[in-house]
């Protein structure tokens, strides 16, 4: 499992995911819990979808 999420991509995933989760906790729609996915992929620096399509935003 090689890191395939770059610095900017990682920051956007963490901030966006945390914002969605906070929204869900504060009474937002149920679908806002999907923020767990970008938050997790940002924290572990690995996106399974990127692997499937052969993409990487990280350093080579």
Image: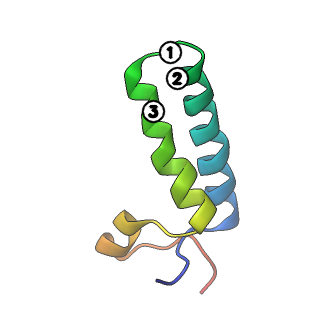
Q: Is residue 9 above or below residue 17?
A: below
Quick one: which residue is furthest to the left in this view?
52
Question: Mark 3 sits on what residue?
Answer: 33
Quick one: which residue is furthest to the top in this view?
27
Q: Helix or strand or loop: what does disc 2 sit on? A: helix
Quick one: which residue is furthest to the bottom in this view?
60
Q: Which mark is residue 18?
A: none
* Contact? badges 2 and 3 (CB < 8 Å): yes
10 Å crowding of disc 1: few (<14), some (14-19), many (20+): few
10 Å crowding of disc 2: few (<14), some (14-19), many (20+): some
Image position, residue 60 (x, y; %): 59, 87
Q: Is residue 33 above or below residue 25?
A: below
What residue lies at 57% left-to-right and 41% top-to-bottom? 17
Q: Is residue 45 above or below residue 39?
A: below
Q: Is residue 13 above or below residue 28?
A: below
How did the renderer colour the structure?
rainbow
Image position, residue 56 (x, y; %): 49, 73
What residue lies at 63% left-to-right and 38% top-to-bottom? 18
Q: Which mark is residue 24?
A: 2
- Judging depth in this view, the residue of 6 and 42 nearest the camera is 42
Q: Quadrant of residue 25?
A: top right
Q: Is residue 50 left or right of residue 38?
A: left
Question: Mark 1 sits on what residue?
Answer: 28
């Amino acid at each position: 499992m090689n890191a395939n999420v770059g610095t900017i991509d990682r920051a956007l995933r963490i901030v966006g995911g945390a914002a969605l989760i906070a929204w869900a906790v504060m009474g937002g729609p149920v679908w806002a819990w999907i923020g767990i996915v970008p938050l997790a992929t940002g924290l572990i620096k690995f996106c399974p979808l990127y692997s499937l399509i052969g993409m990487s935003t990280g350093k080579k």
